[in-house]
């Protein structure tokens, strides 16, 4: 968006403006103002949405879950020396050898 304000040319778009490269600093400043408005709006709205979601369902896990590991706490998976054990419906299965653990 900023480079449009730099390289715009009336030779390409006769109804448009010349950019900074062709001597029209006002069009560049208009584009720069647009970038600042869009970035500010996007940041504020995203921050608000994240805060709203965090009130409904916390985004960050607890420090105890971090210590345990997210595979175990979030996905109920445990890894032991080359073997992935998935605890599904109270039955642990060795997925490498396809036998109950």
Image (cartoon, rainbow, N blue to C red):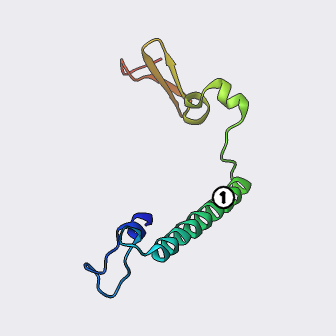
Quarter placement of the N terminus: bottom left
The residue lying at 69 percent from left, 48 percent from top is 58
Direction front: furthest residue: 23
Question: Picture coordinates of residue 72 (x, y %)?
Answer: 58, 28
Residue 36 found in image quarter: bottom right
Question: Picture coordinates of residue 21 (x, y %)?
Answer: 37, 67
Direction bottom: furthest residue: 15
Above or below, 71 against 13 in this view is: above
Q: Give whichever of 57, 90 is nearer the camera.
A: 57
Question: Picture coordinates of residue 51 (x, y %)?
Answer: 70, 57
Residue 10 found in image quarter: bottom left
Above or below, 80 against 56 in this view is: above
Q: Give whichever of 75, 4 is nearer the camera.
A: 4
Above or below, 70 against 10 in this view is: above
Direction left: furthest residue: 11
**Which SS class for mark 1?**
helix
Query: Would you say 74 lies left or right of 81 here?
Result: right
Total labels: the figure holds 1
Above or below, 76 against 55 in this view is: above
The residue lying at 48 percent from left, 17 percent from top is 101
Question: Picture coordinates of residue 7 (x, y %)?
Answer: 35, 68
Residue 56 found in image quarter: bottom right
Query: Would you say 57 lies left or right of 8 here?
Result: right
* Residue under numbered circle 1: 47
The residue lying at 25 percent from left, 78 percent from top is 12
Around disc 1, counting alpha carbons within 10 Å, would you say few (fewer than 14), some (14 to 19), or many (20 or more)? few
């Amino acid at each position: 968006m900023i480079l449009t304000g730099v390289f715009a040319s009336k030779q390409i778009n006769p109804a448009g403006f010349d950019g900074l490269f062709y001597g029209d600093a006002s069009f560049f400043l208009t584009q720069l103002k647009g970038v600042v408005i869009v970035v500010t709006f996007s940041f504020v709205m995203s921050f608000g949405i994240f805060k709203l979601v965090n009130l409904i369902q916390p985004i960050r896990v607890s420090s105890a879950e971090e210590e345990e590991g997210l595979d175990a706490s979030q996905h109920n998976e445990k890894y032991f020396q080359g073997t992935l054990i998935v605890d599904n419906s109270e039955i642990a299965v060795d997925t490498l050898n396809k036998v109950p653990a």
